[in-house]
Amino acid sequence: MDHLQQKKKWGRRRQKTLGIRRRLRASSDRPRLSVFRSAKHISVQLIDDTSGRTLAAASDAEKGLRDELGSKKKLERATAIGKLIAERASAAGILEVKFDRAWYLYHGRVKALADAAREGGLKF
């Protein structure tokens, strides 16, 4: 892929992400559960869009979790992160969120994280 094709590809992804976030922000009574997925890691944040603050976050690259989750498969790590963010959200007093999957398909690790967060008590 040459430089211009790569630039167009990332531009389309950015537009899709912003479109999804715009629709989620339309009624900002609940914080946004934003997912970031790379080739190796997955992380999630609870973001209050009205104040622009991160209320809680979890990642499989955190120091305390790196050793514990390092030997597990990516899908299992996503499930563990979903449970962890649900615990941290309930500790912060948050029970209902809006799920922001960015441009990722609701499949695989993203779906596993969402299901685990629901099992942990989050509603979205």
Image (cartoon, rainbow, N blue to C red):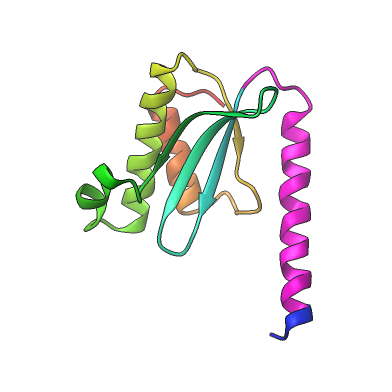
Magenta-tinted stretch = 5-30
Residue 79 image point, x, y percent: 36, 43
Residue 54 image point, x, y percent: 54, 30
Identify the residue shown where x is 33% and y is 49%: 77
Q: In which quarter of the image is the C terminus?
A: top right
Residue 22 image point, x, y percent: 78, 37
Residue 94 image point, x, y percent: 49, 17
In the image, 31 versus 119, the foreground residue is: 31
Identify the residue shown where x is 40% and y is 37%: 82
* Occupied quadrant, residue 34: top right
* Occupied quadrant, residue 88: top left
Which residue in the rendered view is the most extreme toward the bottom?
2
Identify the residue shown where x is 60% and y is 53%: 105
In the image, 45 versus 72, the foreground residue is: 45
In the image, 81 versus 113, the foreground residue is: 81
Task: Report the side of 71 relative to 19 (left or right).
Answer: left
Q: Does the magenta stretch include residue 21?
A: yes
Identify the residue shown where x is 46% and y is 64%: 39
Chief SS of the magenta region: helix
Q: In this view, does 19 lie above or below 124?
A: below
Q: Does the magenta stretch include residue 66?
A: no
